[in-house]
Image (cartoon, rainbow, N blue to C red):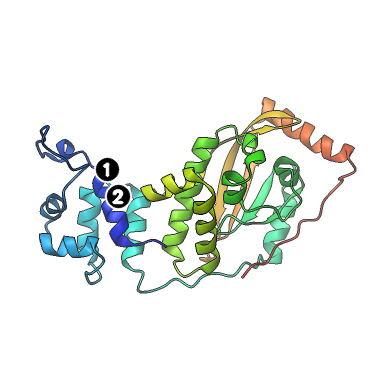
């Protein structure tokens, strides 16, 4: 699903030659750096770097990877991804989809903010009452990537749809590098590529993103605009499972909006949908 060769090629094409001291003129036809330029700046032979981009080289050393990361101006997330791709001979076992009862109890304690439990494929495995009301779905909920790219009627829910798509594709790229043998992830990526031109274009860029926190804006059909803050809590057990909490600043319009959302659920008799986990191996 993902490989070192493709990642190196896309990162090389981003680098401005002038930024690394290479003069350019109108005759230059290459976007970014040439292979031999990356090799020279990294201190490796041209032949070895060419074999890396062709997927024919043996596993590169940590020193070589660090040098490439420096020349290609990789950020911390991209650097980690580069090292992970280079180590893919040592496969990371694809995790199952089981959610521990103790984690469900933690989710159950979050009463005043939408909260979700998601896996590395962005399947919503469980969610609290407000999460179901926000997404307009019973919990367990949808796959967020499929919800975002393939369900046209749902796009209006995401006020910043373009940036959300960048986050989702960047997340799935990271997941593909970490769990390259996951058939469900491969199937999802194929489905998204077949059904969405934007997904195909973004996937080809090979960008990676680790979204740990930040602004998330929803346009709820009944409540209106909800500007929330998302915190991602990754479990330390390499399961790929995250707890996401969407909070509102005290006294903000978004806090009032969440109260209205909770009230709408109560008005429709939806006093407290159960928090249950979806299992998918």
Q: Residue at x 12, y 63 (%)?
A: 47
> Where residue 123 sits in the image (x, y, percent)?
62, 57
Image position of 239 (left or right of 39): right
Please indicate whether residue 249 sits to the left or right of residue 56 in the image.
right
Give me the C-alpha separation between circle 2 and circle 1.
7 Å
- Binning the other alpha carbons within 10 Å of mark 2 as few (below 14), some (14 to 19) or many (20 upward) gives some
User: To which residue does mark 2 refer?
Assistant: 10
Q: Is mark 1 on a helix, strand or loop?
A: helix
Q: CB under 8 Å between callouts 2 and 1?
A: yes
The quadrant of the image that shows the C terminus is: bottom right
Q: Which of the 4 quarters of the picture holds residue 64?
A: bottom left
Quarter in which the N terminus is drawn: bottom left
| Residue 149, image x, y percentages | 56, 45
Residue appearing at x 84%, y 49% in the figure: 272
The vertical placement of 185 against 155, above or below, is below
Write down the residue under mark 1. Answer: 14
Q: Horizontal and vertical percent for residue 172?
A: 48, 54
Is residue 17 positioned above or below 96 on the image?
above
Q: In which quarter of the image is residue 277?
A: bottom right
């Amino acid at each position: 699903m993902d490989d070192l060769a493709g990642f190196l090629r896309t990162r090389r094409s981003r680098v401005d030659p002038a930024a690394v001291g290479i003069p350019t003129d109108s005759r230059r036809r290459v976007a970014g750096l040439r292979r031999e330029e990356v090799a020279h700046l990294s201190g490796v032979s041209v032949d070895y770097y060419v074999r890396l981009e062709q997927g024919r080289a043996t596993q590169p050393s940590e020193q070589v990877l660090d040098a490439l990361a420096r020349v290609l101006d990789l950020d911390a997330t991209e650097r980690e991804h580069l090292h992970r791709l280079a180590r893919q001979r040592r496969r990371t076992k694809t995790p199952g989809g089981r959610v521990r009862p103790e984690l469900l109890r933690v989710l159950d304690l979050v009463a005043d903010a939408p909260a979700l439990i998601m896996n590395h494929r962005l399947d919503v495995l469980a969610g609290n009452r407000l999460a179901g009301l926000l997404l307009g779905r019973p919990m367990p909920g949808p796959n967020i990537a499929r919800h975002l790219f393939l369900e046209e009627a749902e796009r209006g829910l995401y006020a910043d749809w373009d940036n959300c798509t960048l986050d989702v594709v960047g997340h799935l790229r990271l997941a593909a590098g970490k769990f390259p043998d996951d058939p469900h992830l491969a199937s999802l990526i194929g489905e998204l590529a077949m059904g969405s031109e934007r997904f195909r274009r973004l996937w080809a860029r090979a960008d990676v993103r680790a979204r740990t926190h930040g602004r998330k804006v929803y346009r709820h059909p009944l409540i209106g605009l909800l500007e929330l803050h998302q915190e991602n809590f990754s479990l330390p057990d390499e399961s790929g499972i995250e707890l996401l909490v969407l909070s509102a600043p005290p006294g903000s319009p978004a806090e009032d909006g969440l109260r209205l959302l909770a009230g709408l659920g109560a008005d429709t008799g939806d006093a407290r949908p159960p928090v249950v986990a979806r299992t998918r191996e």
